[in-house]
Image: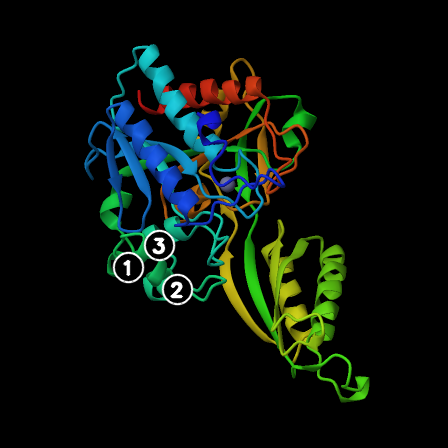
């Protein structure tokens, strides 16, 4: 299945993937999902927020299902595994249960969440945040991409109904338990010497946009003393973020900047930078943002997203660690990455995650990798977990 997806949204020059939400590539991936669901006789549903659900058995509020899955979109220039491994493994685990002649006592669902990475509109896990009501639809619809198109425009173009966006209790009530399998985005399992692990907690994390305003002018004729160049405070902010992160024991990244008008021979009029910061301690993360807002007193600072710490249901976590581990329970790992499972857990859905070993630990890059044998171990572990949960 990963091979079937290998060409979709792939940049032939870098080998990286660009699978923005609602792009051509995303629509093709959605079609692939529908095909896999159909091939297995699963009932396909797209909910009001563009999330896809493929059901084996019909869930109801009285009889909610066990759901597994992940996302198919990617960061720009991302790898092949972040997201797709979870969706592919979900279908493969379902196949394995059928091979084992397991008849689940509750409906079993495969999910594909919309716009998990937030690569296009800036808000990660937009599909699950909309579903759970964590992201108000008015705010989501007004988000713009690099071309200035709003999410509302983009949805209309994709034949969807923007007016239907928003909290969806009916869809949510069908999810009794959610398990997301994901490639590990670190080297915890390499250290443990195990192919599969279980998530303990997701660090609190957020994104902030800093807009620095200056005055656009000629790069040759404007004397240095006469300039109001917004790149200078932006550069100071990047350095201050690194320094503060080291001091406060968190991580901080400025991975995206936008400079307008963007001419090599002009002083910019506006420079924007996006700060992503995370850490085990929420107070330390918040304090870093407050400190930077002070350092950048002239900038307009806006919080684009915030996710508090997510501690997965410990009973479910331990049960899954046992089911997935064979003789010795699977190791439990913390993670600095956000996931749809974290959003569902925060909304009160018992949720858990399985991680598959990543030999280099590299993620959000074409270098992301998982060995075939480890992917297969992940599928077996997921099938064991689902069998346990569907008993
Ligand atoms: Zn992911």
For ligand 1, tell me if the residue under mark 3 lies within 8 Å. no
- Image spot of residue 265 (x, y percent): 72, 74
Which residue shows up at 55% across the image and 57% down it?
206
The span from disc 3 to disc 2 (Cα, nearest Å) is: 16 Å
Q: Comparing marks 3 and 2, which lies closer to the viewer?
A: 2
Residue bearing mark 2 = 150
226 shown above or below 48? below
Rate crowding at label 1 as few (under 14), some (14 to 19) or many (20 or more) other CA atoms within 10 Å.
many
State which tag comes first along the sequence, 1 or 3. 3
- Most extreme residue toward the right is 224
Q: Dot 2 lies on which element?
A: loop
Quick one: which residue is furthest to the top in this view?
100
* Residue 97 picture location, percent across and down: 34, 16
Between label 1 and label 3, give the one nearer the viewer.
1
Q: Quadrant of residue 247?
A: bottom right
Q: Image point 49% across, 46% down: which residue?
A: 310
The image's mark for residue 162 is 1
At mark 3, the secondary structure is helix
Q: Nearer the viewer, residue 113 or 258?
A: 258
Check residue 130 in the rendering and tell me which mark sits there, or answer none.
3
Chain-order first, disc 2 or disc 1: 2
Q: How is the image coloured?
A: rainbow
- Left or right: residue 250 versus residue 311 is right
Category of crowding for the residue at label 3, using alpha-carbon neighbours closer than 10 angstroms: few (below 14), some (14–19), many (at least 20): many
Q: Is residue 250 above or below residue 73?
A: below
């Amino acid at each position: 299945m990963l091979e079937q997806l290998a060409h979709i949204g792939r940049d032939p020059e870098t080998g990286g993937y660009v699978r923005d939400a609602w792009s051509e590539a995303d629509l093709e991936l959605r079609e692939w999902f529908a095909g896999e669901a159909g091939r297995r006789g699963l009932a396909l549903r797209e909910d009001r927020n563009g999330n896809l659900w493929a059901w084996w058995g019909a869930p109801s509020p009285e009889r909610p299902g066990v759901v597994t899955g992940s996302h198919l979109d990617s960061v720009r220039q991302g790898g092949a595994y972040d997201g797709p491994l979870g969706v592919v493994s979900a279908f493969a685990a379902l196949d394995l249960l059928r091979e084992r002649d397991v008849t689940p006592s509750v409906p079993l669902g495969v999910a594909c969440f919309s716009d998990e990475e937030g690569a296009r509109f800036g808000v990660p896990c937009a599909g699950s945040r909309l579903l759970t009501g964590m992201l108000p639809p008015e705010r989501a619809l007004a988000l713009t991409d690099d071309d200035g198109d709003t999410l509302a425009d983009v949805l209309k173009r994709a034949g969807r109904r923007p007016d239907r966006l928003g909290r969806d209790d009916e869809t949510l009530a069908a999810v009794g338990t959610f398990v997301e399998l994901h490639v590990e985005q670190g080297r915890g399992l390499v250290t443990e010497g195990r192919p599969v692990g279980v998530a303990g907690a997701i660090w609190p994390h957020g994104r902030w946009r800093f807009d620095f305003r200056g005055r656009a002018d000629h790069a040759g004729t404007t004397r240095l003393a006469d300039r109001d160049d917004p790149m200078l405070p932006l550069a100071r902010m990047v350095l201050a973020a690194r320094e503060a992160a080291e001091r406060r024991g968190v991580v901080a990244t400025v991975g995206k900047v936008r400079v307008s008008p963007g001419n090599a021979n002009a002083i910019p009029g506006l420079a924007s930078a996006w700060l992503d910061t995370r850490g085990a301690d929420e107070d330390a993360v918040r304090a870093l943002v407050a400190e930077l807002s002070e350092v950048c007193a002239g900038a307009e600072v806006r919080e684009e997203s915030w996710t508090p710490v997510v501690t997965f249901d410990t009973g479910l976590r331990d049960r899954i660690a046992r089911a997935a581990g064979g003789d010795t329970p699977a190791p439990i790992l913390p993670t600095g990455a956000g996931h749809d499972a974290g959003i569902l857990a925060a909304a009160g859905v018992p949720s858990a995650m399985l991680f598959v070993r990543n030999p280099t630990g590299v993620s959000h890059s074409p270098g992301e990798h998982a060995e075939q044998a480890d992917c297969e171990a992940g599928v077996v572990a997921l099938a064991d977990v689902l069998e346990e949960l569907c008993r």
